[in-house]
Image (tube, helix red, strand yellow):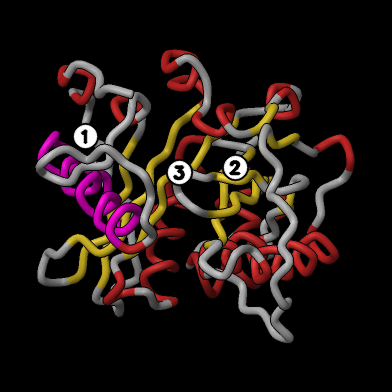
Amino acid sequence: MSLMNSKDFEAKPEARPETRPETRFTAGFATSPEEILETQKLRYQIFAGELGAQIDGGEDGVDRDAYDPYCKHLIVREAGGRLVACTRILTDQQAARAGGFYSAGEFELSMIDSLPGRVMEVGRTCVHADYRSGAVIATLWQGLAAFFTQHGYDYLFGCASIGLEDGGAQAHAILRQVQAKYMAPGYQRVRPYHLLPLSDGEPPQKVRLPPLLKAYVSLGAKVCGEAYWDQDFNCADVFMLLNVSDICPRYARHFLGIQPSTDIIGHA
């Protein structure tokens, strides 16, 4: 899909979310086309360069799609200014302008339409290979929390990806683990358009949750059914739904640096 007209990037600068003073990482929103281009190049570097995703990035190596102009691009920089992580937010209001949510291309999303309150989608999350630590993921989530508390969103959803480099054996093991512990009730399920095929590989004895998936479930998010097989990105996408009022208080205090009773649940 092609990038929309550049004037769609022209929006009021978003207030930069606060981050903990002791960290060397800061979260904020891209406020110019140049900053958004930075995120698109990081995405290409990771998705195409590392994971082998089939992306037409052109000569400059850019991952862009038709949703980018409608999204807010959350970025994490280290103290020296280097971009080390990014994700993008598509709000319910902007999704209506964009023709729907990105996830609607992978899942049947009628469940989302039935949710009470405001919803926002998180996607295209990636972290530079040199900075895949808990501190960077925490900073990213602090930025997301600042946004959904400030604007009163009730639900956050998105896909947590599991790589299929081993043919899918690990992905199926991880899915069994998270579905057993964190499955959403039946009325909050989505249906993938392409199911992850079975794997004949030897299942690992011990699995480790990918950092983004671990962050989702630690916060209190639920797994909304079976995974989608993304052949272009060679991964299994697990649809995650977070009810903001259900965020784990301990996790919110220590990981997000916010007080759920006042900063989250108060927004209905």
Mark 3 or 1, which is nearer the eye? 3
Instruction: Say what secondary structure mark 1 lies in.
Output: loop
Instruction: Say what secondary structure mark 2 lies in.
Output: strand
Indicate the amino acid at tag 3. Asp
- Residue 158 at x, y percent in the picture: 56, 44
Q: What is the quadrant of residue 230 in the picture?
A: top right
Please say whether residue 59 is visible from this viewpoint.
Answer: yes
Q: Local crowd at mark 1 within 10 Å, few (<14), some, or many (≥20)?
A: few
Asked if the residue under mark 1 is in contact with the one under mark 2, i.e. CB atoms within 8 Å, the reply is no
Residue carrying label 2: 157
Q: Tell me where the magenta segment starts and ends, as one range.
A: 27-49
Q: CA distance from mark 2 to mark 1?
A: 24 Å
Q: Residue furthest right?
A: 186
Mark 2 or 1, which is nearer the eye? 2
- Residue 196 at x, y percent in the picture: 68, 49
For image coordinates 38% across by 60% down, the residue present is 51
For image coordinates 70% across by 59% down, the residue present is 220
Q: Main secondary structure of the magenta part?
A: helix
Asked if the residue under mark 3 is in contact with the one under mark 2, i.e. CB atoms within 8 Å, the reply is no
Magenta region includes residue 1: no
Q: CA distance from mark 2 to mark 3?
A: 21 Å
Residue carrying label 1: 13
* Label of residue 102 in the image: none
Q: Local crowd at mark 2 within 10 Å, few (<14), some, or many (≥20)?
A: many
73 and 229: which is toward the camera: 229
The mark that comes first in sequence, 3 or 1, is 1
Instruction: Relative to 78, say whether 146 is above or below.
Output: above
Residue carrying label 3: 232
Magenta region includes residue 28: yes
For image coordinates 23% across by 19% down, the residue present is 8
The quadrant of the rendering that contains the N terminus is top left
